[in-house]
Amino acid sequence: MAEVVSESMSVIEAPDVVEQLVTEDDTPVDNLPSEKQQRLLVEPLYSSWEAGRPFLAASNVGVFSAINRPPVVPDMLLSLDVQVADDWWAKQHRSYFLWGFGKPPEVVVEIVSNTEGEETGRKFYEYARIGVWYYVICDPQRLVQEEGVRVYELHIGEYLPKRDSWLERVGMGLTLWEGEFEGKWAWWLRWCDREGMVIPTGAERAEQERERAERLAAQLRALGVEPEA
């Protein structure tokens, strides 16, 4: 992290340098399966996760460790105890600048869709270099690894594969879940609790509440009480 801190000082002293960075290029690069998977990893955290602390979950946002290094762009990132600036349209707040947030994300997820994404190459070493605690490679087609999902944890500056998918520093785990999401039945990578129960989407929570209300109404009717509308 010393490298990031020393390079970040020059950014603070010359903030106009940030204005020259390309933080987004508006190039559409994702496929439909990857786009849905990314959304399924982000939306439930905001609709259902009781984190008890501020966090940022995002897809396809550049992570900049220094002005003179190209960014890495994870398919999904999760960073705890951070807040997005109120003026988030300002150039210095539109990407994940380590010198702005003061720390790397705790988790990055890459969804493999071809053999050219450098998930096991440049990105693997870059995420370790900047200090991301957990690196997850989801490879549904087994293009770059034998397993569908592989989770790495940072140990003394390098990644070692985990035997399980529980992320202790985050307080959540990951699981492969077979089911329907937005009309598409498939195997999905999802966040889960210690017992393996998935963190529900907003739509799933609404359906759970509807079913709970129907069960309560049925119980009341069995007792001869007509529930109020």
Image (cartoon, rainbow, N blue to C red):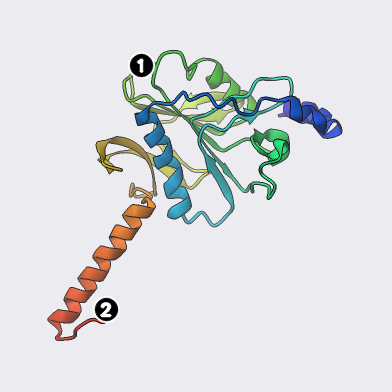
Q: What amino acid is at disc 2?
A: Ala
**In what quadrant of the picture does the C terminus appear?**
bottom left
On screen, residue 185 versus residue 18, left or right, reads left
Where residue 135 appears, as percent x and y from the top left, is: 50, 30
In this view, the residue in front, 182 or 127, is: 182
Residue at left offset 36%, top offset 30%: 32
Mark 1 Cα shell of 10 Å, populated few (<14), some (14-19), many (≥20): some
| Tag shown at residue 229 | 2
Q: Nearer the viewer, residue 194 or 179?
A: 179
- Location of residue 10 in the rendering, given as x and y in whole percent from the top left corner: 83, 28
SS for dot 2: loop
Confirm whether residue 144 shows in the render. Answer: yes
- Sequence-first disc among 2 and 1: 1
Q: Residues within 10 Å of mark 2 (few under 14, many from 20)?
A: few
Spatial CA distance of label 2 from label 1 is: 53 Å
Q: Quadrant of the N terminus?
A: top right
**Looking at the picture, which amino acid does disc 1 mark?**
Leu
* Quarter of image, res 186: top left
Q: Which of the numbered marks, if any, corresponds to residue 132?
A: none
Identified at 71% across, 36% down, the residue is 91
On the image, the x and y values in percent for residue 112 come to 40, 22
Query: Disc 1 marks which residue?
Result: 143
Q: Nearer the viewer, mark 2 or mark 1?
A: 2
Residue 156 placement (x, y as % from top left): 61, 27
> How many dots with numbers?
2
Front in this rendered view, residue 88 or 186: 88
Residue 21 quadrant: top right
Q: Secondary structure at mark 1?
A: loop
Q: In the image, is 124 to the left or to the right of 141? A: right
Report the side of 175 relative to 220 (left or right).
Answer: right
The answer to whether one can see residue 164 in this image is no
Judge from the rendering whether residue 35 lies leftward or rightward of residue 92; answer left or right.
left
